[in-house]
Amino acid sequence: MSGLFQIVEASTLSANMFLKHLIVLADFGGEMIKRVNGNFNSLFPLNRLEYLWSLQNYSYQFNSLPVPGQLTNTKLGIDGKKILQNQSLSLVHKDLIVILLFGANSLNEKTAEVLAKCEIGNYLGQPDKLDKFIKQRSGLAG
């Protein structure tokens, strides 16, 4: 996972903008993010996401979630005003990126159901499939 975060940090895209793009692609808006934060302990009772990716099991230990109170777009730096401010990759950004990429692959079936839209990670390393997925989600597929 550290390799992915290094790519994000080296990108010309700010961390909050990268996160916003993932949220839009996953169609996983602010209400769902609030729900994940509010129900975090039932979704991730061991405080980690155990998931299957590319025929291997992985485990990601959360570092920041759940946050106290509500997890809002403003706190994430992805609302109207803050989206234009370049933010570096924070622990909460990392935790959400992992959920958005691999949540649907959770080994916990109930968690996978709640996070069914969080499947973008399935297309990493497969540019044709990723391109098709992005076009479908953005309404550009013909």
Image: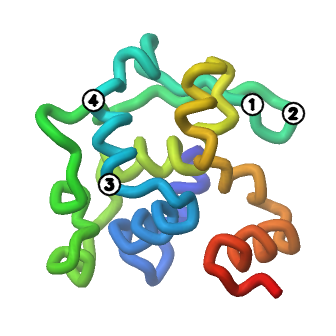
Q: Which residue was labeled with disc 4?
A: 38
* Residue 55: numbered disc: 2
Q: Closer to us: mark 2 or mark 4?
A: 4
Going by the numbered disc 1, the residue's amino acid type is Leu
Vertical side of 40 occupied by 12: above or below: below
Q: Which residue is mark 1?
A: 52
Image position of 66 with respect to 17: above or below: above
Side of 88 where 95 appears, left or right: right
Q: Are marks 4 and 1 in contact (CB under 8 Å)?
A: no
> Could you tell which of marks 2 and 4 lies nearer the N-terminus?
4
Give the mark nearer the N terminus: 3 vs 1: 3
Amino acid carrying label 4: it is: Gly
Select label 4 or label 1 by which is in front. 4
Q: What residue is at 66 percent from the left and 81 percent from the top? A: 139
Instruction: Please provide percent x and percent y for residue 80.
Output: 21, 78
Is label 1 in a helix, a strand or a loop?
Answer: strand
Q: Position of residue 138 (x, y in %)?
A: 62, 78
Q: How far apart are the two marked residues, 1 and 2, measured between alpha carbons?
A: 6 Å
Label 3 amino acid?
A: Gly
The reply to whether dot 3 and dot 1 touch (C-beta < 8 Å) is no
Residue at 46% x, 26% y is 61
Q: Which of labels 3 and 1 is toward the front?
A: 3
